[in-house]
Amino acid sequence: MYKVLLADDDYPVIEYLKQEIPWEALRLTVAGEAEDGVEALAKAREVMPDLLITDIGMPGMNGIELIQSVKRLNAGIRTVILSCHNDFGYAQQAVKLNVQDYVLKESMESEEIAGILEKLVAQIEEDRRAEARSRDLAQFVRQNRSVLKEKMVATLAGSPILDEADWLGTFKAHQVDFARSAYLPVFGYMNGRAGQLRRFQSQEILMYAVSSCMDEILAESGSGAVCFPASQDGFLFLFPVNGSCGGTADLARMQAETIQSAVRRSLKIGVSFIVSDSGCRDVKALKAELGGLMAVAEKRFYLPDGIVTDKRRADLPYAAEDIFAHYSRMADEFGALLAEERTGRVEETVSRWARFFEKNRFQPQEVKSFIWKLVMDQHIRLRSAYHMDFAFSTESLQQEMLAAESVYELERWLCRVWRSLIGTLSAMTGGSRRSEIVFVQKYVQKHLDRKMSLEEAADALYMNPSYFSRLFKKETGESFIGYVTRVKMEKAKEWLESSDLTVEEIAYRLGYDNKSYFNKCFKTVFGVSPSRLH
């Protein structure tokens, strides 16, 4: 049974939960209850719960403060917030604290709470199983030879061969005998290594888990192939060449698919393979072929996850075209998704651009710089336009993006980011902020291509222009005309830095017939004329 702590200064709520939730059926027991945060923290120290259900607005210590304090005692505790407040500020804080669920008291049902608790119990049990597996694997790692084999391959790839006889003896000790057979090299690598590291807690445990699974499959196959850990996420397979090299390559591809299935089934990890096109009859030939395979693996940005492919098909050059020539078009598309809050079109739009990158094979680092500029430009624009704060940090976002090893990982990452931005914008719209102001700000963002007057905005809200002008200044701290000008100039700056549009073309696109007036507005906002940035 897992222990639950209930904290709420509304005693009937605690009684409702105790009576209406099928605790025993959920493998839970109420280990303590408290009417304020201070008392709840003392109870937590006493019983150390696995799960905390707490109100937000309690005397002495509110629910957010309680969660922060309890997580210092037990970082893995699952938490559910109950609140009378449909307040986006609280929701943001809850997200930052990794709260599992946020339930409004006015609409909560016992079935809803029970469903949430059932999912949390499943998560707790999975975490405990994972911890047990990690402890067992950690002990095996200390006794395993995989670390020595990895160092051996790293030395072969990075250092000159001074004594070939010594190398032949070393390989023979690992069941690779060049005197009896040539060997076909195959290079395998994990997909999404960054995410797997978070699951397995260390590089050594992760590599041991995967290589052990691979060794088991190879031993069962009777092919005589041997697996060597070769890099942070890579593996070198050596298949004895029996008969033709082409026949061995076919066998290697079949074995690769079997290994893929086993690793995915037992460890939930994807693996890809690059098969060499020639056998190696000595250590020098193996060193050269290993270098070529690793170089191809380094260029795997456009290779799909879980692929088994030949070296010559994977070794394709990158394009020399400037990716930033397409920036303005992409920024406009993604900006429209935000302005219209179109979550349903995020996947389709991101996928279309990912396939565009894939088809044109732009340099991976340029693709990441391109995407990062898009995210930061839109992030800054939203903060400026709507005075919004976001639950994520730009530093953690950038680390996640840089860890993406393929265009497919980058595609999934960008989908998550864009859904998060739209979700935050939607939540802000539905929160305590004046809906009239949000409506007008979105209205401006959607119609940057034409002139926008105070009277037009007031008419859209059925307000008196004078009243609307005072309301806008009070809520945002700037005049409506000043806001419109600033937003347009920020868009102009974006186009000047990322497109080939002339100053005249940009002015026209933003609804300015008079170039001199446009230049004056731009200099007022940024302190320099637009020609200085063009």
Image: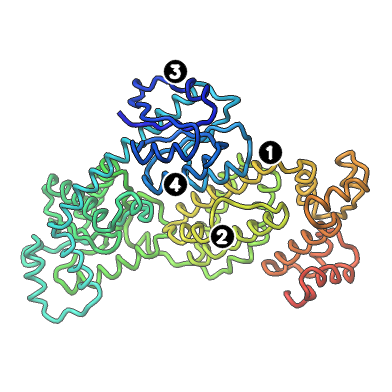
Give the labeled residue for mark 3. 19
Find residue 464 and report its horizontal and vertical position in percent. 93, 43
Question: What element does badge 3 sit on?
Answer: helix
Quadrant of the image occupied by residue 495: bottom right
User: Which quarter of the rendered picture does the C terminus lie within?
Assistant: bottom right
Residue at coordinates 31% horizontally, 66% vertically from top-left? 294
Question: In the rendered structure, which disc, 3 or 1, sits on the residue that comes first in sequence?
Answer: 3
User: Which quarter of the rendered picture does the N terminus lie within?
Assistant: top left
Give the labeled residue for mark 4. 69
Residue at coordinates 67% horizontally, 67% vertically from top-left? 498
Give the labeled residue for mark 1. 430
Three-letter residue code for mark 4: Ser
Q: Is residue 240 above or below residue 108?
A: below
Do the CB atoms of the residues marked 2 and 4 lie less than 8 Å apart?
Answer: no
- Numbered label tally: 4
Q: Is residue 218 above or below residue 505?
A: above
Marks 3, 1: nearer the viewer: 3
Three-letter residue code for mark 1: Gly
Quick one: 168 or 476, which is closer to the camera?
476
Marks 4, 1: nearer the viewer: 4
Measured Cα–Cα span from mark 3 to mark 1: 34 Å
Measured Cα–Cα span from mark 2 to mark 4: 37 Å
Q: Residues within 10 Å of mark 3 (few under 14, many from 20)?
A: few
Question: In the rendered structure, which disc, 1 or 2, sits on the residue that comes first in sequence?
Answer: 2
Quick one: 314 or 459, which is closer to the camera?
459
Question: What element does badge 4 sit on?
Answer: helix
Quadrant of the image occupied by residue 278: bottom left
Q: Residues within 10 Å of mark 1 (few under 14, many from 20)?
A: some
